[in-house]
Image (cartoon, rainbow, N blue to C red):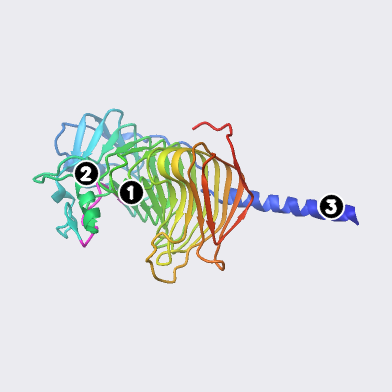
Amino acid sequence: MRRQRSYCLLALSAAVLVVNTLQEVAAKDLRHVTEPKIPPACESLKGSGSDETAVIQKALNSCGKGKTVHLASGTFISGPLTIPSGVGLWIDNEVVLKATSNAKLFDNGKNLCGTVSTQYNGCNPLITMKNVDGSGIYGKGTIDGQGGVKLTAKTESWWDLAHEAQVKNQYQNNPTLVDIESSREIILYQVKIINAPNYHVIVGNTNGFTAWGVTINTPPSARNTDGIDPGGSQNITINECSITTGDDNIAIKAHFAPTRHISVTNCHFGPGHGMSIGSDIDQGVSDLTVENLVQQNSLNGLQIKSDRSRGGLVTNVVYSNVCMRNVTNPIVLNTQYSKTATGNHIPEYKGIVFKDIEVKTAGKFTFDGFSDAKPIEATLNNVIIAKGSTWVTEHAKINGKYVVGSGNKKC
């Protein structure tokens, strides 16, 4: 009888292992993603350092599918651009595409762009890809949002407006740099995106998005400058990316539709608010793998944040092989992001796995569930934290334990 019981226990353990393995396999981009290649050019342009919006847009409009408009040399200044379906923009090495400092050129008809107001969304993005298939931005050049440059005929920069909006508890009407909406198989490859006036990259309602080898670099003091924000999208790969910014390094949201099947791999995050999920997640986030991440000198590390006004189910999330140093809040699972929120969109975090995590410096770890009826459900597997850290849990069911000590990871 004892032998039979041992066999049963072994079988149960094996079954649990298989289930966990299957979950981790499912918690990824379902596509087989390989390193992109830059498509051939349909036309090459040389920058003069002046406003060349019309020249670039004309070239994009006339370019054939499967090809790119090649910004081959120099500096280009531009207002809003739209990339057509199947067409790419190739920004070559040492080339700079600068967003114009003339806020009027970004205005979307509300006469709000470049102002602080009780209203928002007054600006068109610098680059838009909407309802397109197979478009992208390629090359080792730079997109510079000029967030710290004084606006034309004004004494303030985009970042000054953001600070003013924070003080007044209003909205800054600043443009996003890259906006991808309702599209398929979009690629950002190798490009450097800096000094964003607002968000760097928004990905909404899109199936198939790859950011490979992308660098995002905006000062930590620049408010509301999220790095990459996928929302209502699926099949997303963010690989070998370096992100430093003034808000979330990555913020995965789900306000209009569920967001699922996401891979964030082999990335390095500098200052920022972390590898975040939330805060708008009422349609649900699932099937996310964050693997081989180094994060340094940031406010937050691995963060899930929401509240009862915009919460939903976050499940099947695996954080694996993560190293953090000088991170104030290495792990934050917060269901009361706004203490004054009201509503019935209750956040639920289930199936959250932390595996092979090492935190080199002391920080605060928070697992703050909504209630005993809706607790956070998380698993710890080889989690090593630094001496002097604090660990706070409320309404949480945590399997496994952490270890105080020092491991072998480098970060």
Magenta span: 118-129
Q: Residue at x 31, y 28 (%)?
A: 93
Hey, which residue is sitting farthest bottom in the picture? 344
| Magenta residue check for 282 | no
**Mark 1, secondary structure of its residue:** loop
Q: Label 1 sits on what residue type?
A: Ser
Q: Residues within 10 Å of mark 1 (few under 14, many from 20)?
A: many
Predominant secondary structure, magenta span: loop
| Residue 390 image position (x, y, % from top left) | 51, 47
Closer mark to the observer between disc 3 and disc 2: 3
Question: Where does label 2 land, which residue?
Answer: 57
The mark found on residue 85 in the picture is 1
| Magenta residue check for 122 | yes
Up the image or down, 111 lies above or below 144; here it is below
User: Gap between marks 3 and 2, in whole Å?
Assistant: 70 Å
Closer mark to the observer between disc 3 and disc 1: 3
Q: Of marks 2 and 1, which one's residue comes earlier in the chain?
A: 2
